[in-house]
Image (spheres, grey):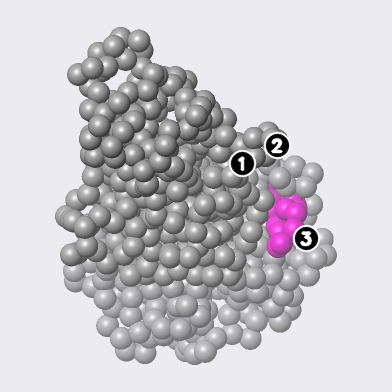
Amino acid sequence: MTWIGQKKLAFIPVQRPTFDEFPAPTDWPNEIMRRAVFDPPNPSSPTLPDRSLRAYIFAASSGRADLDAVVMPMQVINRGDVPPDALEAQLGSQLRDQGFDAAALVMLGRPPCGTSQLGGFWARFCMSENVGAWAMEFMHCLTGLIDLRSLPRYLDNEVHQDTSAFDEMASNRGMHPSAYTKATIGWLDQSAIAQHVGRTVEYNLHSVGLIQPPPSGRLAAVRIGAQVPYLMVESRRMVDQFESNIGSDGVIVYLVQTSDPFHFEANNVIPLALLTATALTVGETFTSDTGVIVRVTGAISGGFSVRIEDPSLHVVDRSAQYGAPAAAAPPTACVVPGLGVHDIAYRDTSGDLHELWRDAQGGTGTTDLTKIAVGGAPTASGTPFFYVDTTRSVLILLYRDANGTVRSLYWSTGEVGADNLSGTADAPKAAGDPVGYYVPDADTHHVIYRTGDGNLHELNWIGVTPVTYGGNITGAISAPHAAGDPTAFVGSGGYNIVVYRSVNGDILSLYWLQGGTGLDELSVVAGTPKAAGDPFGYYTAYNDTIQIVYCAGDGHVFELYAAGNDTITGWDITPTDAPLATGNLAAYYSAGTNTKHVFYRSADGQLHEIWWMPGGGTPAHVNLTERFGAPLAADRPAAFTVEGPNTQHVAYRGTDNHIYEVIW
């Protein structure tokens, strides 16, 4: 039941000659009408806040509910305990025929005497009770909501206090109801309550006592958890004459323990259990018994900013967090160590490039990079590629446009710049997706891409100087043509290393320092099978080792590795319980855990991890889709590790074209 629109309410003064403790006011009907429709603290100063029942209902409902009050002739019932429906036989049909939605007996006496029929017609309260008691009893009638205060039937099993410091339906003190209660009776749209879908997300909360719905960019509350019991987080501030009755200013957290729409309890526990006896202020943190962390990060006009972290959420729908557009290709991802930022980027169906970022404090957001690039940027084709200028903490996102021009978007903490790389360098057009890397010791950038004839080309620049064309690096030494996109990185002594799959399926590497380019036939020397997908490679300085992984034609995953100047070695790292791989892989070394990780997609769309400890560890298999309940993947994943907290991250495009992140 909801209270929307105007309700016609009858107020019936009831005198009990033998039992009344106080004489009836000389102008009792007008006193009742004043309390019902206009009740300033000082009648001689009508500009002071109105504390009438009508003002309360109008404020608490943000104008969605109203009342028309009519004071009926006084009735005499000379008994001590007058039930709220004592006049049903005498007046009930008459009042309903006159269009009344509810009626209240107004008694003389000491509070509490408020009571009512849940979802019914009759209420009762004392003249001396405050507006909260009057409001609560009419709300019981018109909405069917029960009391939320702790009652004796709860006490045996109750472990938390009720929400009486912050919810009218638990206190009858004349404060606003909670966001949960407002939404139940139609005074707040469910869309104003966010479902927490990220591991760590920041929210701007608009205080419940202010006009709803919240302005753009704000929410009334956040729900954490999909099933009962679940947490609710909301902002409360003493913003009007009614919210001055709340316990304290700040952010509250409470537990919803019922699925009944009218708050009826389940399992003999109170429906709403307050977990923050005093509201949290800026800098304060609440941690639930399930590990959910709510931190108040700042005060904003009329509310607070909070950061919510739920470590149990191993799978995050990053697209759903901010309604980001559908992805048209797999994502790329990186970490900026100097900023503590994690970034995922992808191409949408219109060709725009978007980022899904997470900052050092755990705050998240999204940006249409194409739209905001200074001077504009053409739309993308294919799959973009991230790398980081670690000297300047600059993210560089490489891509090719519809004409095959290799371009980049770049930014740090300010505006997004755009560069026409191959056009500026007068280099050939790309047929494949570019990759890149940065060499800190030389302050050089290198971009590698494939042209339509299968040759690989290089672009390079120093620091922030203009880009130059490094040449056709396969053609220069008559190396076999590439069948797919390369992987590239800097190795021991600053050597540039480009690894690719040739047209006959061999894994080859090109390498150079200052002089000419060399060629190594990696898989041939190592004796490993021909490749069915593009290789993925990286270098670990701690043991001076290059590592390349790839998917062979039989679906097994192979690793090629060499320390220093050692001869390349290869092995099948596919555990016996691991499904066959398809497509391209992602891989990294986690220094904090001293583990190596390879990620791939099986033919049924499930994501898998192979991990082991270098130096003799046995590879183990984890089905990430089954372990974390992750949606199926549409294509290859991207992956990164965050040193320090030692968290592992896999980003991928789901079959619904959302970008998901798996975290553990």
**Disc sitting over residue 45 in the figure:** 2
Residue 439 in which image quadrant = bottom right
Residue 547 lies left or right of residue 426; in this view the side is: left
Q: Residue at x 43, y 33 (%)?
A: 24
User: Residue 70: x, y in percent?
Assistant: 44, 19
Q: CA distance from mark 1 to mark 3?
A: 74 Å
Please say if 375 is above or below 554.
above
Question: Is 607 part of what is drawn in magenta?
Answer: no
Label 2 close to label 1 by CB (< 8 Å): yes
Q: Earlier in the sequence, mark 1 or mark 3?
A: 1
Q: Which dot marks residue 616?
A: none
Disc marking residue 41? 1
Q: What residue does disc 3 label?
A: 467
Name the amino acid, label 3.
Val
Which range is magenta?
404-421
Q: Rounded to the nearest whole Å, what is the CA distance between mark 2 and mark 1? A: 8 Å
**Disc 1 residue type?**
Pro
Q: What is the quadrant of residue 296 in the picture?
A: bottom right
